[in-house]
């Protein structure tokens, strides 16, 4: 039986992200304080609180998944600010590129949605892996999913993808940053995890938790 | 326990901005539909390039304090230490454009670049000519001019740009003036403490009492070295040596000097610093044509200061002495 993800799944996942971000807000702030300016956890919290306030309205005013995610992305773009606003905003805004009009998607389509989201982040941020950014968490997960055959094993595959993303975030610890505020630190950024990489895998983990329920 | 007078940390931007527009109603008003945009009440009646100043809050009086007559025509505000998002950036252009286009000025940070570029795309879609200059004056932040952060030098670049706009120059010409001011503006700072973030109530970074970090950025970006605090003269000497090592400033240059407090450093200390700055400049054979001392570009409750030197030529002198009236910078 193939997994089918409907609009409500995406709505629940977004609500779950908000919950996770609030829980991890101070942790994200701490990561960002070490090598940034301390605003990542707070800005993600502000952005997702806004999304939560509007979630029912966004759901009611859209018929299909792509439109729903686009509005979520625009709300984030409007409220998160900093580099994270355009990056997370673009992720959600572009997730639905290939599924216009659809009210439910297969897991294969979902894998492509993740790929579209990650590609949008790479494009907007002009970044690839190895630069100590959210791409270091997102790209390994997207690549893993694309390389797998889906055959009734969606939950296991997704769990493994999340593990790859988590490791991707860990791998930023030893990197010298090439982008963002921490790029100014040179060697001093080594030994610290990138806050955006951390919030990225947490975000995808929220989708996983909803799927595996 | 942070020693601030705020209400809910999530409301600081809204409450600060409301307080500001109520305190200075001659100069500014809130955009009717966007509370992240502060508009000038003193915009010229005749069309001219509009100058929009923006960036994160937490640096007051930067940016909204410089909106006024022959000053910025609008300020766009982000969350604390965060760039504004594209919509207010676009809204500020829409509300001020008089047909000659809009020049955005902000500090060189990747978040600001991304958001302002997106806001400019939105303005251009609407037929509004728009461009930007990302200010780069912190000489410690990079050997490469293009990579430098924007700190208190933002103000000097603004001053040049607003005067160029007042003189009726085109968008391209105003941008060129701003870039020229930028290329001749050099800053460096020192931090003795961290700012506290309103939402968490905690400092951004840890600094032991009795330590300092020379070259630190206004958001706490690491500088050259952390070490025990020295005397004002020793610190200024080190800052000035660094500025001269990293720039082509030299004997015979005429400069505008800004000694800037980062929020919690007493004026007494700032003037003691200025005293040493002026001695060093005299020793090196430069002359000070104009000086400013005070809290012009802060980081909330950070204890620290920065020195900004702007080398003057005939053009820059003209622009920097052009009359201007805003709550935090007046030139007669």
Image: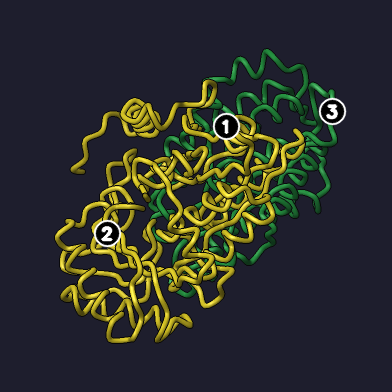
Any idea which chain is the yellow one in this picture? B
Whether residue A213 is visible here, answered yes or no, is no
Closer-to-camera residue (A88/B160):
B160
The residue lying at 51 percent from left, 67 percent from top is: B148
Q: Which residue is mark 2?
A: B293
Query: Closer to the camera, A146 or A212?
Result: A146
Q: Which residue is mark 3?
A: A100
Whole-number angstrom distance, CA of label 2 to CA of label 3: 58 Å
Q: Label 1: how many residues lie within 10 Å, few (<14), some (14-19) or many (20+)?
A: few
Residue A112 drawn at (x, y percent): 80, 42
Give the left or right position of residue B88, taking residue B211 as reference: right
Q: Nearer the viewer, mark 2 or mark 3?
A: 2
Residue A189 lies, in percent from the top left, at 46, 68
Tell me the distance, in whole angstroms, between the alpha carbons under discs 1 and 2: 32 Å
Question: Given contact means CB atoms under 8 Å apart, are the residues at marks 1 and 2 in contact?
Answer: no
Q: Residues within 10 Å of mark 3 (few under 14, many from 20)?
A: few
Q: Which mark is residue B45?
A: 1
Residue in the image at 43% along x and 68% along y: B310
Alpha carbons under labels 3 and 1: distance apart: 47 Å
Q: Colour of chain A?
A: green
In front: label 1 or label 2:
1
Please, what secondary structure does the residue beneath circle 1 have?
loop
């Amino acid at each position: 039986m193939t997994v089918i993800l409907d609009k409500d799944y995406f709505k629940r996942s977004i609500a779950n992200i908000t919950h996770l971000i609030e829980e991890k807000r101070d942790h994200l702030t701490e990561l960002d304080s070490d090598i940034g300016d301390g605003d990542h956890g707070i800005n993600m919290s502000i952005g997702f609180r806004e999304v939560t306030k509007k979630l029912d309205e966004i759901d009611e005013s859209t018929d299909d998944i792509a439109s729903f995610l686009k509005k979520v992305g625009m709300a984030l773009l409007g409220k998160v600010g900093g580099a994270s606003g355009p990056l997370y905003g673009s992720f959600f805004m572009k997730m639905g590129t290939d599924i216009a009009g659809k009210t439910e998607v297969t897991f294969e389509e979902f894998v492509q949605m993740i790929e579209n989201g990650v590609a949008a982040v790479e494009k907007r941020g002009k970044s690839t892996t190895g630069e100590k950014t959210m791409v270091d968490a997102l790209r390994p997960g997207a690549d893993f999913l694309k390389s797998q055959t889906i055959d009734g094993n969606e939950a296991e595959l997704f769990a493994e993808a999340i593990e790859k993303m988590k490791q991707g975030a860990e791998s930023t610890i030893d990197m010298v940053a090439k982008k963002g505020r921490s790029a100014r630190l040179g060697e001093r950024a080594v030994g610290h995890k990138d806050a955006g990489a951390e919030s990225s895998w947490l975000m995808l983990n929220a989708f996983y938790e909803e799927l595996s329920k | 326990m942070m020693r601030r007078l705020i209400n809910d940390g999530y409301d600081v931007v809204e409450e600060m901005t409301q307080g500001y527009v109520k305190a200075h109603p001659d100069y500014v008003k809130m955009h009717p539909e966007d509370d992240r945009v502060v508009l000038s009440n003193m915009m010229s009646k005749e069309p001219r390039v509009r100058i929009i100043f923006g960036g994160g809050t937490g640096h007051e009086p930067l940016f909204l304090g410089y909106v006024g007559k022959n000053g910025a025509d609008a300020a766009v505000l982000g969350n604390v230490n965060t760039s504004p998002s594209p919509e207010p950036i676009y809204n500020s252009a829409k509300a001020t454009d008089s047909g000659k286009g809009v020049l955005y000025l902000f500090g060189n940070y990747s978040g600001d670049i991304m958001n302002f570029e997106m806001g400019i795309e939105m303005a251009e879609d609407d037929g509004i000519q728009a461009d930007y200059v990302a200010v780069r004056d912190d000489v410690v932040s990079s050997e490469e001019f293009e990579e430098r952060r924007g700190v208190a030098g933002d103000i000097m670049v603004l001053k040049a740009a607003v005067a160029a706009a007042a003189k009726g120059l085109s968008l391209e010409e105003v941008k060129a003036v701003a870039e020229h001011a930028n290329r001749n503006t050099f800053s460096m700072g020192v931090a003795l403490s961290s700012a506290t973030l309103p939402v968490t109530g905690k400092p951004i970074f840890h600094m032991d009492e009795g330590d300092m970090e020379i070259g630190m950025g206004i958001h706490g970006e690491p500088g050259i070295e952390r070490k025990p605090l020295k005397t004002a003269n020793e610190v200024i000497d080190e800052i000035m040596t660094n500025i001269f090592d990293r720039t082509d400033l030299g004997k015979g240059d005429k400069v505008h000097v800004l000694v800037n407090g980062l929020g919690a450093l007493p004026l007494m200390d700032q003037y003691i610093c200025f005293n040493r700055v002026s001695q060093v400049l005299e020793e090196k054979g430069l002359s000070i044509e104009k000086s400013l001392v005070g809290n012009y570009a802060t980081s909330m409750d950070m204890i620290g200061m920065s020195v900004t030197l702007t080398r003057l030529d005939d053009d820059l002198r003209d622009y920097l002495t052009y009359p201007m009236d805003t709550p935090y910078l007046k030139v007669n």
